[in-house]
Amino acid sequence: MKIEQYAVIGDMHTMALVGSNGSIDWLCLPKFGSHACFASLLGIEANGYWRLSAADPNPSVKRSYRGDTLVLETEYTTPGGRARVIDFMPVGSRSRQIIRIVEGIEGRVDMHMRMVIRFDYGLTVPWVRHLGDSGFVAIAGPNALTLHTKVKTRGVDLSSVADFAVGEGELESFVLVWHPSNEEGGEPTPDVKLELEKTHAFWSEWSARCRYRGPWRAAMIRSLITLKALTYEPTGGIMAAATTSLPEFVGGVRNWDYRYCWLRDATFTLYSFMTAGYSEEARAWINWLLRAVAGDPSQLQIMYGESGERLLVEIELRHLMGYENSRPVRIGNAASQQFQLDVYGEVLDVMNLARASGIKTDEDSWRLEVHLVTFVIDHWRDPDEGLWEIRGPRRHFTHSKVMAWVAVDRAIKAVEQYGLDGDVAGWSSVRSAIHEDICREGFHPGRNAFTQYYGATELDASLLMMPLVGFLPASDPRIVSTVELIEKELISGGFVQRYQTSGTGEVDGLPPGEGAFLPCSFWLADCLFLMGRTDDARELFERLLAVRSDLGLLSEEFDPIARRQLGNFPQAFSHVCLVNTAYNLNPQTVGPAEERSSI
């Protein structure tokens, strides 16, 4: 099944991927970064799934979210009638639950349910004990799943199966609850109708708070709901995606674990929440960030776990064959230990934005910022692994130097604009030195453009950030020529590649081949807007909207040849950029591109 054929449901602790065939093929419990109990997405059916659909092998299928919510409805039409499956995860529950309601609409429809539970990413077969006529409990090690249902289930080939039918007005339900195996089955069996009403009300009320009223509002609302669902509610951390190892190139090795919180997304994410009116989520994100990065500046990581965990050891799961044979399947992410200079700029930038947005910060946070900018001043001349987390040698990446400049620039502005204590004269000298260094070493006269790293001739889409962070105005001839060259050399099938991966892999240390990284195309639209090419920017934005799934979801990348989504799903950064670009292109609002470049 293609990546875009999956819907998502979630409770702001974890998220399940539900295929258009009614199968939950990916679910980690009890939180985003936990081991999966359904992992057939990255393997075969024997690695775990939960299918609930019409028994007819060829039903007509329609699916949608119920209004502006995360309640999924899938309608099956068969020769015998119509039935609807309603999937959701209750919000606010003490335990993690998935509720699936089967509702007869007209006639009579035969339904089929099959559940294959495999803990430890599809590896461990649980011990199953039936609970009379009310379901069963499956246990392995520390994990337990209890299924509450009045539908009679039976065991078949290490799976649980049920066949039943619903007529008009009839309803059957299945409630799956995770709990520690040393405890009973969590909360009492819920009133599924009441839980549905509460969950629908929560998401409807949350969506209604969005203050955006311009064009593309429906697309923006769906993206904001996705971002809220990717938020780990206990801490405010926002996951980059709900999955691991969905490939950037089908059959390739560019398969990474994205179930972590990236600092790099911080400023964009804050803009998306603040501009849409979600100040509570913005404050929670800032507070998470401050807790996560606290400590020695030399130990700053590019990503952390849901609660700020630092040890994200990368290993390969050899028992999984990978999505469409894309191996290896990885959990953990070795890039967490890389030195990436740009994240220091992201942190200083987002803190400056927080102050500008009215989010109060204390003296401790400013002391941390001073430590960070001091580290940048001492290390901005060092090579690093860069924005794209390369697995090759460190280089002097132009984007990294630009974000070092941002770090110092935002520290200076914090002092000048908010009366904080800092060495403005010394910092200003360093800011000028970094700027001069980039303009001298990062610009290639022969190509009339800024290049990927000092001394290179290759381009990189990260250079599009230069006008967006205010390093140079979009009207600067060097920026104009760089953008035009990126349009000429990095666009494939109408979308922007991060950089050319068709060479020997000497830059990123990996075999060639990947899709177009969707945020880069949004960045190009933002740059075109700042350059006054509004029609071109809108055309590109509409092209990006067209590659969303039928449910309005985006992954990390898009294959313009095969016309399919690639990479981990749903991707927070893609949805963040969609929200911000919509604001940028709305003639009645001042968007993040203008604000961030001048703040």
Image (tube, rainbow, N blue to C red):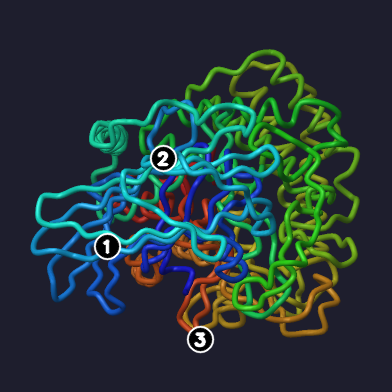
User: Mark 1 and mark 2: span between their CA atoms?
Assistant: 34 Å
User: Looking at the rendering, which quadrant does residue 46 occupy?
Assistant: bottom right
Q: Is residue 462 at all visible to an observer of this figure?
A: yes
In percent of width and height, residue 171 lies at 20, 48
Judging by the rendered image, the residue that carries numbered circle 1 is: 63
The tag earlier along the polypeptide, 3 or 2, is: 2
- Tell me the residue at 61%/32% (across/down): 180
Q: Position of residue 381 (x, y in %)?
A: 89, 50
Residue 240 rendering spot, x and y as whole percentages: 59, 50
* Rendered image quadrant of residue 482: bottom right
Q: Say whether residue 458 is left or right of residue 530.
A: right
> Callout 2 environment at 10 Å: few (<14), some (14 to 19), or many (20+)?
few
In the foreground, 498 or 436: 498
Type of the residue with mark 1: Arg
Q: Tell me: 521 left or right of 334.
A: left
Indicate which disc residue 132 carries. Answer: 2
